[in-house]
Image (cartoon, rainbow, N blue to C red):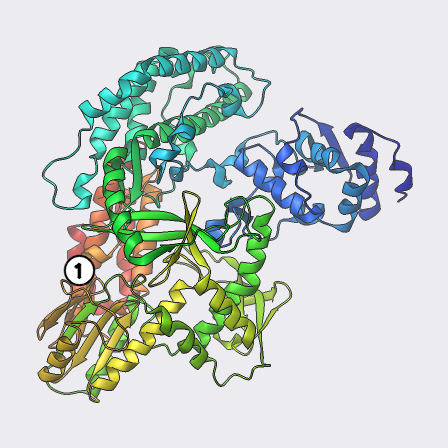
């Protein structure tokens, strides 16, 4: 293939099509594969991709992010998911290797990029379709079915979360300066002039009625009275839904949704969405159901449509609904309410902005003075990463019953600096975390599921009555003794030679089947020499290993400890006490200190003392009442050496039963039952009963996998109690979900009976047939 002929001879994207074809002919000559390129759009290449001096590989990644952020139909983002789903730092990623992005990052395409220039190269990827036979490589698809697999088809509840008064200007749902029709379809070539007129009318109505909004808010959503906790200060969801409905009634043209039936469906869908939980996956294709699209004049060319016209109208409707909820509804809600999840829960609360500002200001004034100190000399910004003096983060407050939880979300860079953050996180911070996790003395349990086994071990070691003291650390992250962290880590690495290198190998592994029967391909980092700890099937090495010396580990730890900062209102705040909850190494810092605290507490007792710890929750067991009394006296004040206080309201001494980590422990038999509230009882938001049964079966399989249902660990009475509570949790979840599912599907008794039969089989497989009669009796009252 001769590239010289293309240099300095051509000026437009069309002129470079032969270059691309030559490239494919060179690589797949004789295979019968041929590439077809066709110009299908005329989008302007975004300046945000042109102005930074991205490398070739970075440019491809940023293009993928741009396409996903703007919901642009392009085969290049087929199968894309959010970074949160893959537990990676960047915004988006692919569950497996993506052949097209790998192809575009190949040396051949790097050469093409160099020859034709960045703007022309991006124009080829944005405005052209490229396919080999029936396989689309990039460009717009003929169908919009990819949206059903792409995460962009989810409604982004996060768009209305955590808004503050200072951010309200950018939350206008219908801004005057924006082209609404472009916001809906992401193209200036609109085929819907009627819709454009309706949206303009909606914006005019919005501007005219804006002065009335505060009065409507005060009338429908007054500040709550009879306050007993922070939760009582939130506005009830029915009032929020009523307020939103009244506003939309005032601004929406009648023809926007076409008929009273469609408007009724819309308001029901809005109620469902606003009643959802933070973790719910709300697919736009489900929200778009039950509307009569033939009632909508701007959408359908005529009452009778052929199959192609109907499919196109459906896809257009889904796109419109996605925009309406994500841009109009969520921004409207966020303009009047601070929407937040409850600490350690997924339930959403809606606070009026004036209410939230009052309670958060009271908390912040006290917190800043007690735990933080301002550092005016430190230069930081949310526009840079590498040039910052500190590792900065933004503030997120979550409500608790009588307090707020202070969380700092790390800044992960912007633009090109995202890659700098990712590189440092992967090759430094993550490695340090992994090394410290392997080196620390694990004086704790890994999860609640370990409780039955731990109690059985203790039961086999002792005789006689058992007494218990339960407590947890007050403000665990905020009161962590900072001065102990570095010495304790130095002690952990004391026997490691200064020149020793920690090698971190990375593998692609195939996980064990989940409760849903799926196996996920993921990347796993392992400390060299500990490959035997990998329970998943290793597929291949992921990339080159990371290597860090002991001195480098200590430097990373010191930087993350001393240079972690909150950046708020253009000011930098360092900690006087404790560590920032939310920063990547804060969790391991807590574990190392509490390992030492557990070791100290054990040294004060005798051989019959058992301490069970998970995070900052402690349970001390002993056969001697006076030993428990000694520990109780110790925690009345600050624990010596650690300067740590416990929650006195939550500390508890018992010789009968004790509630710990969502379970009830019988101290006479040392058996443990899981409480109903510890199960996920939130409604399952799915479109059909078949999907609901599948979700409940996954719920069941996940529960049965724990030791609470292990016949070799639990006695028969405890096993039956746990089974009863488990089936009750299934029943509660089914009843909570049934009403919303019934709006889209019909409950068939035959399918319901099949679900109960499957439930019975799964339980019997786990616990044996000896409990069959009792299980059937429980399922009969499901």
Could you tell me residue 314's position as x and y percent?
A: 47, 24
Query: What residue is rendered at 52% in x and 72% in y?
Result: 553
**Of residues 67 and 379, the one drawn nearer to the viewer in this rendering:** 379
Q: Quadrant of residue 465?
A: bottom left
Q: Position of residue 245 (x, y in %)?
A: 28, 22
**Image: 527 above or below 752:** below
Q: Is residue 466 visible?
A: no
Quadrant of the rendered structure where residue 446 is? bottom left
* Viewer-closest of 353 and 187: 353
**Residue lying farthest to the front in this orientation:** 377
| Residue 51 in view here | yes
Q: Secondary structure at mark 1?
A: helix
- Which residue is depicted at the point 49% across and 37% down? 152
Quadrant where the image shows the N terminus = top right
The relative height of residue 677 versus residue 68 in the rendered view (above or below) is below
Give residue 507's position: percent from left, percent from top.
57, 65
Give the left or right position of residue 267, taking residue 229 as reference: right
Identify residue for label 1.
724
| Residue 494 as seen in the image, left or right of residue 723 | right
Where 644 falls versus 737 (above or below)?
A: below
Where, by quadrant of the figure, is residue 713 drawn?
A: bottom left
Q: What is the tally of numbered marks visible in this picture?
A: 1
Where does residue 646 sit, x and y in percent of width and height? 20, 67
Q: Residues within 10 Å of mark 1 (few under 14, many from 20)?
A: some
């Amino acid at each position: 293939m001769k590239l010289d002929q293309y240099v300095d001879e051509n000026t437009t994207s069309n002129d470079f099509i032969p270059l691309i074809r030559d490239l494919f002919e060179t690589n797949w000559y004789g295979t019968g594969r041929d590439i077809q390129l066709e110009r299908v759009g005329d989008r302007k290449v975004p300046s945000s991709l042109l102005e930074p001096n991205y490398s070739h590989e970075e440019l491809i990644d940023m293009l993928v992010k741009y396409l996903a952020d703007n919901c642009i139909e392009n085969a290049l983002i087929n199968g894309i998911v959010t970074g949160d789903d893959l537990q990676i730092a960047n915004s988006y990623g692919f569950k497996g290797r993506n052949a097209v992005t790998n192809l575009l990052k190949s040396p051949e395409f790097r050469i093409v990029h160099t020859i034709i220039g960045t703007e022309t190269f991006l124009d080829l990827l944005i405005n052209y379709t490229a396919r080999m036979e029936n396989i689309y490589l990039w460009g717009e698809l003929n169908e919009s079915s990819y949206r059903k697999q792409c995460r962009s088809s989810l409604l982004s509840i996060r768009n209305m979360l955590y808004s503050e008064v200072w951010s309200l200007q950018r939350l206008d749902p219908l801004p005057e300066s924006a082209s609404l029709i472009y916001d809906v379809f992401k193209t200036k070539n609109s085929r819907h002039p009627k819709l454009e007129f309706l949206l303009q009318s909606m914006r005019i109505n919005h501007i005219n009625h804006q002065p009335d909004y505060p009065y409507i808010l005060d009338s429908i959503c007054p500040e709550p009275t009879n306050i007993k906790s922070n939760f009582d200060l939130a506005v009830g969801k029915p009032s929020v839904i009523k307020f939103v409905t009244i506003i939309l009634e005032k601004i929406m043209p009648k023809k926007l949704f076409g008929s009273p039936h469609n408007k009724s469906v819309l308001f029901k869908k809005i109620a469902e969405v606003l009643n959802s939980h933070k973790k719910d996956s709300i697919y736009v294709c489900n929200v778009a159901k039950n509307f009569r699209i033939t009632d909508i004049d701007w959408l359908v060319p005529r009452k009778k449509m052929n199959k192609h016209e109907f499919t196109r109208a459906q896809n257009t409707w889904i796109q419109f609904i996605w925009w309406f909820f994500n841009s109009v509804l969520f921004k409207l809600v966020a303009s009047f309410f601070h929407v937040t999840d409850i600490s350690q829960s997924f339930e959403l609360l809606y606070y009026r902005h004036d209410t939230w500002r009052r309670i958060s200001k009271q908390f912040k004034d006290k917190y800043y003075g007690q735990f933080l100190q301002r550092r005016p000399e430190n230069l930081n910004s949310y526009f840079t990463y590498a040039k910052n003096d500190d590792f900065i983060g933004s503030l997120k407050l979550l409500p608790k019953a009588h307090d707020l939880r202070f969380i700092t979300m790390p800044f992960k860079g912007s633009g090109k600096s995202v890659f700098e953050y990712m590189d440092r996180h992967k090759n430094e911070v993550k490695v340090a975390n992994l090394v410290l996790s392997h080196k620390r003395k694990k004086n704790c349990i890994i999860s609640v599921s370990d409780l039955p086994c731990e109690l059985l071990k203790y039961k086999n070691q002792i005789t006689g009555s058992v007494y218990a003291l339960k407590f947890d650390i007050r403000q665990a992250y905020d009161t962590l003794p900072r001065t102990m962290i570095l010495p304790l880590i130095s002690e952990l690495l004391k026997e490691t030679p200064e020149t020793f290198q920690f090698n971190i190998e990375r593998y692609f592994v195939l996980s064990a089947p989940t409760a849903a029967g799926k196996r996920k391909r993921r990347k796993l980092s392992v400390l060299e020499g500990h490959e035997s700890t990998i329970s998943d099937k290793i597929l291949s090495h992921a990339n080159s290993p990371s290597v860090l010396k002991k001195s480098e580990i200590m430097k990373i730890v010191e930087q993350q400890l001393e240079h972690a900062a909150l950046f708020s209102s253009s000011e930098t705040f360092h900690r006087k006490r404790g560590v920032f909850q939310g920063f990547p190494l804060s969790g391991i810092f807590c574990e190392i200190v509490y390992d030492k605290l557990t070791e100290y507490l054990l040294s004060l007792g005798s051989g019959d003392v058992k301490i069970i710890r998970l995070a900052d929750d402690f349970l001390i067991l002993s056969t001697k009442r006076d030993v428990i009394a000694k520990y109780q006296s110790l925690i009345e004040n600050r624990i010596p050496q650690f300067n740590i206080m416990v929650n006195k309201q939550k500390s508890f001494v018992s010789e009968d039963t004790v509630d710990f980590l969502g379970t009830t422990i019988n101290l006479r038999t040392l058996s443990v039952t899981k409480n109903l509230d510890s199960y996920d009882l939130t409604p399952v938001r799915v479109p059909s009963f078949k999907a609901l049964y599948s979700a409940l079966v996954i719920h069941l399989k996940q529960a049965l996998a724990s030791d609470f249902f292990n016949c070799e660990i639990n006695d028969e009475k405890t096993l039956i109690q746990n089974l009863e509570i488990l089936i009750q949790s299934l029943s509660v979840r089914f009843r909570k979900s049934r009403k919303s599912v019934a709006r889209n599907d019909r409950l068939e008794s035959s399918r319901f009976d099949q679900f109960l039969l499957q439930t019975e089989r799964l339980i019997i497989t786990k616990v044996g047939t000896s409990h069959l009669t009792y299980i059937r009796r429980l399922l009969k009252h499901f």
